[in-house]
Image (cartoon, rainbow, N blue to C red):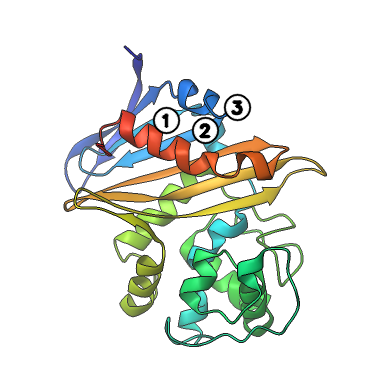
Amino acid sequence: MKHILLIFTMGLFFQLGIAQQVIEKDFKEQFNKYGVDGCYVLYNPADNEYIKYNPNLCDSGYLPASTFKIPHSIIALEEKIVKDTNQIIKWDGHVWPNQPWNQDQTLKTAMKYSCVWVHIGFAEQIGIEKYQEYINVFDYGNKNLTGPPTRFWLAGNFRISANQQIDFLKKLYYYELPVSKESTDIVKDIIILEQTDNYKLSGKSGAGTLTDTELIIWLVGYIEKGDTPYFFAMNYKTENYAKFQKARYEITKDILSELKLIVE
């Protein structure tokens, strides 16, 4: 039996009248299986309950890296840089080491393949001042966009924690961002990772540079069972991206299985 410890109860969930609770759960086994360790947080809005592994790390901020493609795609849609998922974004012929990038893209394929050049192209058209406006009203991360203006989510002072990722995902899911429903629906559709008769899993991965050798690996999103969403964010550090990049998906699914949200 794994030990579950109720850490504290804080505040009131005014809308539902349910006291918020934070539960610490040991997911070390799921991380150790893949030779990494990090943090994990899941939010269950039905019970106003957070489940956390390494809760102190859940407050640690890191570069959002490609998890920023979720808000970034909304911004590109709102700014009419791209109008829908059918619009072709032309490849300029530059050869990238990631083969799926070396072709024309759409907003959907750019999300699927995490195509960096597409989003750098968006940034060249949108401008850092406009990004700052969106990031401020989204209340996304530390809101510090100091860094390269066309790749501030990959380098510079921009940071977001696992807890802040959850805060943003809730606003996305419940249409609480000050953007159009159409833009939100498009992005919610293109981040679907897996869909079965029992659940729908949505999210986005990311990998950000910490040092010359170390990376932070992300996976953030939500799983829907019936009409109930459960929001999650996880990260871990590694010096071997090629070996451990897929672990984020496996760890996430192992934890969701442990929590009975995925039943094989």
Instruction: Give the quarter of the figure containing the N terminus.
Output: top left
What label sits on residue 39 in the rendered view?
2
Q: Quadrant of residue 169?
A: bottom left
Mark 2 secondary-structure assignment: strand
The residue singled out by tag 3 in the image is: 35
Mark 1 secondary-structure assignment: strand
C-alpha separation, residue under disc 3 versus residue under disc 1: 19 Å
User: In front here: 35 or 4?
Assistant: 35
Whether residue 109 is situated above or below residue 204 in the rendered picture: below
C-alpha separation, residue under disc 3 versus residue under disc 2: 14 Å
The residue singled out by tag 1 in the image is: 52
N-term-proximal mark, 3 vs 1: 3
Whether residue 245 is situated above or below residue 158 in the rendered picture: above
Look at label 1 and name its amino acid: Lys
Whether residue 84 is situated above or below residue 15 in the rendered picture: below
Residue 216 location (% of width, % of height): 65, 43
Residue 230 location (% of width, % of height): 30, 45
Crowd tier of the residue under label 2, counting other residues whose Cα lies within 10 Å: few below 14, some 14–19, many 20 or above: many
The residue depicted at 49 percent of the width and 76 percent of the height is 107
Instruction: Give the quarter of the figure containing the C terminus.
Output: top left
The residue depicted at 52 percent of the width and 36 percent of the height is 58
C-alpha separation, residue under disc 2 versus residue under disc 1: 8 Å
User: In front here: 85 or 142?
Assistant: 85
